[in-house]
Amino acid sequence: MSSLYFIGIAGTAMASVAVALSRAGHRVAGSDSALYPPMSDYLNKHRIPCHTGFDPLNILRDAPDVIVVGNAISRGNPELEAALNEHMNLVSMPEIVRRELIGKNRSIVITGTHGKTTTTSLTAWLFEHAGLTPGFLIGGIAENFNAGCRASGKKKGGHFITEGDEYDTAYFDKRSKFLHYRPDIAVINNIEFDHADIFSSLDDIVKSFRQFIALIPSNGLLIVNGHDTIASEISSQAFCPVERFGMSEAFEWSVSDIDVSETETSFQLAHKGNIAGTIRIDQFGSHTILNTVAAVAAASHAGIPFPVIAEGVRSFKRPKRRMEIVGEFDNGITLIDDFAHHPTAISATLSSLRQRFPERRILACFEPRSNTSTRNIFQKDLENSFSDADIVIIGKVHRPERYAEHERLDTQKLCSSLAGSGKKVFQSGKDPAGYPEDIVRFIHENIRPDDLIILLSNGSFNGLKTSLTESFLKKG
């Protein structure tokens, strides 16, 4: 086995892959600018040596066979410069995944702007529940596995299930990550504009998805959300069979008889006009139904019987930060954490909460943090994405210095628009020194019994989750 060194090891995917390769027998070490939970705990638990800060001596002393360069690493990084000067073997994370983890296994790749992590986690669990011991790479810690990545139980002839991100690969490879994953079965959940730091337009993103479709072999399968116009259109160019899924009898995988109770959603699923059976999930909203059907379709194509699939769905646990209940406090107050940051995802998340809890007030706290949400590209879309919230709290723009003022999300304008629609709105961060304590204070001044508080961010929200939890525990 070879020795591997990860530059930028603390990222969710990088840490997960590092641990999986260590467990597969490789000697693994790495470094990052900062190490913090949960990934620092995960790396420490698996005894991966990690350096805090980048120092050329780290690499020179370790003398690894291969250096895995994270996509957040760029020229000027001291360790990268040392590796280049010494002509060391550099690879990207997707390359090492394809080479060492996908290998000769059957590759199932889940893509799309939204729903990738949940759909990939569920797909992996359905294969696991069926006794197939799949390998997987998920952009989060999957609760059913308590891991984000692992090798397949077989060297070849098994299955490897990958969350296929359209983000770029590495500083030396600007292609989308999913182009490295050699798909046999591919899922496209949806296609929208995102990642404004690397894509200049929706057309650029569509181009990457077209390239991805061109990789599927003729004996493979493309599973597509039939309601997504762009995904449906470009799937017509596939050289493999295509199966669509959604809420229409015209689709190969068709959902009907949806029933929502306080504790679950159930629906009937048909394949090519033949009733497969009933699926029950403890989640809510049309987006969760579509994510589930995509995973069911992939598992079914791999030969897993429907009764086994339906049973597996019932025991699935959502990944962390996907409608994760952080705490339930005095007076029935509930705190929820969710990764949603794109307007479509925010709208879908709040809609599913409203569907599940029609009588409870929803306090939505949104942090503009991603490279797309911090710009004004979605200014109008964000104004329309909080319709199911009763009170909206807008955090400060993360690292606003990255953009000129005319390119930046205008949070004051966003708050004014939301207030104009009749919502109670709070613009946080006016005093940076008091952030996010100003949010905590506002919530306690406005909270009522049985209220739901949901945090919407792809980052830490400046520790708001911890601050709110501690404040409610102290008050209780």
Image (spheres, helix red, strand yellow):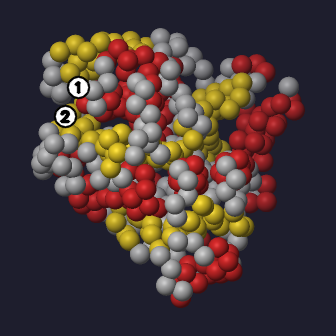
92 vs 312: above or below: below
In the picture provided, is 32 more to the left or to the right than 186?
Answer: right
How busy is the neighbourhood of tag 1: few (under 14 within 10 Å), some, or many (20 plus)? many
- Residue drawn at (83%, 30%), measured in percent from left and top? 473
- Residue drawn at (54%, 27%), measured in percent from left and top? 317
- Residue drawn at (55%, 81%), measured in percent from left and top? 83
Q: Is residue 299 visible?
A: yes
Quarter of the image for the C terminus: give it: top right
Residue 168: which quarter of the image? bottom left
In the picture provided, is 425 more to the left or to the right than 156?
Answer: right
Q: Is residue 407 visible?
A: no
Quickly name the residue at label 2. 243
Q: Residue furthest front?
A: 1
Percent coordinates x, y for residue 59 in the rendering: 63, 76
State the CA–CA distance, disc 2 to disc 1: 7 Å
CB of mark 2 within 8 Å of CB of mark 1?
A: yes
Give the residue type that dot 2 points to: Glu
- Residue drawn at (73%, 36%), measured in percent from left and top? 443
37 vs 291: above or below: below
Percent coordinates x, y for residue 380 in the rendering: 42, 50
Which element type, helix, strand or loop, lies under badge 1?
strand
146 vs 44: above or below: above
Q: Which is more toward the observer, 176 or 304?
A: 304
Q: Which is more toward the observer, 406 or 453?
A: 453
How busy is the neighbourhood of tag 2: few (under 14 within 10 Å), some, or many (20 plus)? many
In the picture provided, is 221 more to the left or to the right than 443?
Answer: left
Q: Which is more toward the observer, 61 or 237?
A: 61
Quickly name the residue at label 1. 253
Percent coordinates x, y for residue 124 in the rendering: 43, 35
